Amino acid sequence: MPKTVLFVPFTEKEDPTLYYDEFNSFTIYEKNCKWIKRLQKKVGANYPDGPSDLKFVQVFYKEGQRSPEMVGLGMHDQVYVRGHSQKGHGRIFSKMQGENELSGAEVGQRLIESGLEKEFAGKLKCYNCWGAYTMSTDDFAQAVADYLWNRCFYSCEFYGYRGSLGSFPGANDHNLPIPELKGHKDAVLDDKSHVRAKNARVRVYPTAVTVDL
């Protein structure tokens, strides 16, 4: 059963508003729910008979706990790492820059702790703004790839994004200049152009250097 996992590497202790925020209806949990709902709607439109072999889930990191949804992922599965970032920052955060920040190595360790196995041969996508901006070791996506490579994750593919990303498919439908982008994950590139997020995505190749926490 091909599975898409939205992985949130932050804990409630680090950010108590992951699930509920009285001042913000768009918590990361709610954004993930909207993302999954869009995926389910898309699948329903493409496969009106209702395929039973696609699964969409979100997993929140819990210290010292393996998630059943992360164990046994295969070559047809994909994991999206959630979190915000900025150009050239090299770290991600749950809400505000400077608060609850995680390095690529810390996120890699939390993926392993959550149950991601060395045999994983699917796609790991660091869905974070500008996570592959410089295409160098300064990037967050590169740090994740290097950390996991050094922990013998040799079979999966790593990806990052070279733009500012919509939080979920259709998040920016109200102000998109290109109608064809509506309902999709979108990105704004360095030149201010709007594109599908997949067109801002680049594959990241591990540099095979030692990366420690």
Image (cartoon, rainbow, N blue to C red):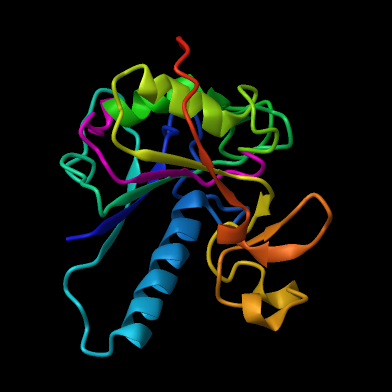
181 vs 116: above or below = below
Foreground pick, 8 / 210:
210
Foreground pick, 101 / 204:
204
Figure disc tally: 0
187 vs 85: above or below = below
Span highlighted in magenta in the image: 113-131
Quick one: which residue is furthest to the right in this view?
191
Query: Residue 49: which quarter of the image?
Result: bottom left
Q: Is residue 139 magenta?
A: no
- Asked if residue 31 lies left or right of residue 6, the reply is right
Whole-percent x, y for residue 177 in the image: 78, 76
Query: Residue 64: which quarter of the image?
Result: top left
49 vs 130: above or below = below
Foreground pick, 23 / 133:
133
Q: Residue at x 79, y 62 (%)?
A: 193
Foreground pick, 175 / 10:
175
Q: Residue at x 50, y 21 (%)?
A: 207
Whole-percent x, y for residue 30 in the image: 47, 59
201 vs 67: above or below = below
Whole-percent x, y for residue 192 in the image: 82, 58
- Asked if residue 145 lies left or right of residue 151, the reply is right
| Magenta stretch prevailing secondary structure | loop
Q: Is residue 25 visible?
A: no
Q: Is residue 84 visible?
A: yes
Quick one: which residue is furthest to the bottom in this view?
48
Q: Residue at x 64, y 75 (%)?
A: 181
> In which quadrant is the N terminus drawn?
bottom left
Whole-percent x, y for residue 126 in the image: 50, 41
Q: Residue at x 36, y 27 (%)?
A: 110
